Every structure is written in C-alpha cells, then in structure tokens.
Image (cartoon, rainbow, N blue to C red):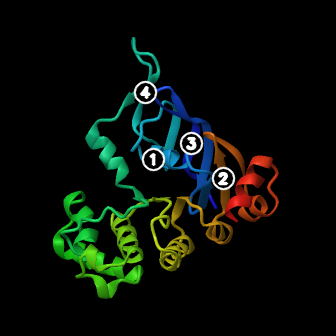
Amino acid sequence: MTEAMVRISQVRKSFGSHEVLRGISLDVPERGVVCVVGPSGSGKSTLLRCVNRLETITAGRIWVDGELIGYRELDGRGSRRRGLCLLKPAELCKQRESIGMVFQRFHLFPHRTALENVMEGPVTVQRVNRVDAERLARRLLDRVGLADRADYYPAQLSGGQQQRVAIARSLAMSPKLMLFDEPTSALDPELVQEVLTVMRDLAADGMTMMVVTHEMGFAREVADHLVFIDGGVIVEQGPPREVLGNPRHERTRAFLGQVV
C-alpha cells in the first residue's frame, strides 16, 4: 500500500446542536480497503457522506488524492487571511466524478434499463458518445455478472441485481475511490453474498474503498484496516483480525458481542 488516497483530519459535523462527528482523523491508503463499523447513529454514514461532500463538514479538512474536498485554500495574500472558500457547484461536481458511492438503497432510474442506468453518467456528465458509453456499460455489467440483464428494468431485477447495477453505474465514471454505505443492509440474506463477491473482486483489482458495513466476515477477509466508531469518535482501529479477535476497548467488545 502507498500514500493516502483519502486523508481525513479532525473532521467535525453538527446538525444544529447535535454533534455527530467529533474530531475524526483517518487515512485510507491508495489501493487500500477500510471498513467502518459501529452502532446505529454513531456517525459512520455521515463520515462517508462528508468524504464526497454530500454533507458539509463543520470543521476539519478532507483530501482525496491530494485535493481538498469542497473547498479551496486561500493563500493569504493582500488583506485576505489564510482560510477556505467554498467551491462553486460546477467545481464540486467535477470533484465528485472521481468518487463513486453506493448507497443502502439502489436509487436506479426505474424507467431506464440496467444498461441505460449505467450509461447515464458517462453520457450526461462526461459527454461520452453513446456508442462508447454503451460499450463501457456492457463491459461493466459483465464485470458484475449481469451481462444477460442489460435490457431489464429495475423492477424486473432482484435487490442484489439492482445493487450490482448500482455498483456498475458508479464504476462507469472511472472513480479513484469507491464509498459503500451499508450496501447489503437492504437485501434479503440470500442476496448479500452476490454483492459482497463483486466488492471482493473490486478490492482484489486494487480499487481504493471505504465501506460502512455490518458484514464482519467481509471486513475480516477483505479489509486492510478496521475502524470502530461510536458517539462520533474513533474508539478503536487496526488490522481487522486483531480488532475483531482481540478488541482492547470494552465498548468495542460489547458491540462485537452483539453482531459477531
């Protein structure tokens, strides 16, 4: 593993008077897989949403591939003091192109086929011509095991198949980083493994990934680093087998006793 693809420094996030993230610092190495676990309401999903600026942080800094996310540093020349200014919407959209995100719910366009869903980003955002976009989309659907479902609409697909289309749709933008927010939590148990298999393959291919999950088996087998968050702070982190097999903190032990 090499230098950090993601650098999170003292990030805080509040919703009104409620502070959800309370000074999170974390590095995700390039080609690394970091799994984030913790109880509901601990701040896991909020942290992920802050990385691609779906949520605006209250304090701190986040960099992806060396680029400050959501802001521009002011250089302090003249009368302006050193600080930050918000990126314009078009600049922020450009940053998000390199960060793929897969949610609990699939958010596919119901009136478009699997193929059309995967083509949408390259065609409308990156202005790729439709012939090349279709070629890419078919290749990605094959990669997630759905080459034979290209012309199916979301309502004709199982939940696991819809989630795999969602993964292919994110990959179509050629992201540097993939964020997964509990991607199997909305699936029936028998469909979970087909999605985790695709994620394992992505990790094996060297995709940098941050994964919020309750799938401890996946975290143990695939992740390079495991982070346990509770109350908006990192309680414990380290190699997955070490954290899961011999947690040091009582809060970690209590949590794992309920989910493992």
Q: Amino acid at mark 4?
A: Leu
Disc marking residue 227: 2
Q: Quadrant of the C terminus?
A: bottom right
Residue at disc 2, secondary structure:
strand
Check disc 4 and report the residue beneath it. Answer: 84
Check disc 1 and report the residue beneath it. Answer: 49
Residue 239 makes an appearance in the image: no
Q: Amino acid at mark 3?
A: Ile
Which numbered disc flags the more N-terminal residue, 3 or 1? 3
Residue at disc 3, secondary structure:
strand
Q: Is residue 142 left or right of residue 124?
A: right
Examine the rendered structure and indicate whether residue 239 appears above or below residue 64.
below
Mark 3: few/some/many CA within 10 Å (<14, 14-19, 20+): many
Residue 73 is situated, as x and y percent measured from the top left of the image, at 44, 30
Check disc 3 and report the residue beneath it. Answer: 8
Residue at disc 4, secondary structure:
strand
Residue in the image at 22% along x and 75% along y: 113
Nearest-to-viewer mark from 3 and 1: 1
**Number of callouts:** 4
Which numbered disc flags the more N-terminal residue, 2 or 4? 4
